[in-house]
Amino acid sequence: MVPAELAGQRLDQAMGALFPEFSRSRLQAWIRQGAALLDGAPVAAKHRVWGGERVTLTAETAP
């Protein structure tokens, strides 16, 4: 879930806060590939979040 504190941020910025173990460029690539969904739907990295949305990341990571 996107916390209310991240409301107004771009999706890629919010995901950077939610998934700090991944670089923002990697997150942006996954968003472009459709591996990151917001409330079950693909969106652009520039999409602004409002808080309360569910982020799903289905990308494969290298071991």
Image (tube, rainbow, N blue to C red):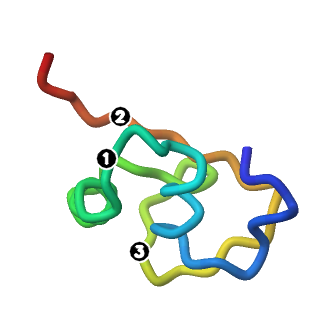
Q: Which residue is mark 2?
A: 58
Q: Which residue is mark 3?
A: 45
At 21% from the left edge and 61% from the top edge, which residue is drawn?
29
- Who comes first in sequence, dot 3 or dot 2? 3
Classed neighbour count for the residue bearing mark 1: other residues with Cα under 10 Å, few (<14), some (14–19), many (≥20): some
Quadrant for residue 44, please give it.
Answer: bottom left
First in sequence: mark 1 or mark 3?
1
Quarter of the figure with residue 61: top left
Q: Residue, x 46% and y 67% (percent of image)?
A: 12
Q: Are marks 1 and 2 in contact (CB under 8 Å)?
A: yes
Residue 42 sits in quarter: bottom left
Left or right: residue 50 versus residue 26 is: right
Q: Residue at x 84, y 64 (%)?
A: 5
Q: Which residue is mark 1?
A: 35
What is the secondary structure assignment of the residue under circle 1? loop
Q: Answer few, some or many: residues within 10 Å of disc 3's Cα (few below 14, many 20 plus, some between 14 and 19).
A: some
Q: Can you give x and y, in whole percent of width and height, for residue 51 in the image?
A: 81, 62
The amino acid at mark 3 is Ala
Left or right, 15 with respect to 34, comes to: right
Q: Residue at x 52, y 56 (%)?
A: 15
Q: Position of residue 49 (x, y in %)?
A: 68, 72
Where does residue 37 sit, x and y in percent of width and height? Answer: 47, 52
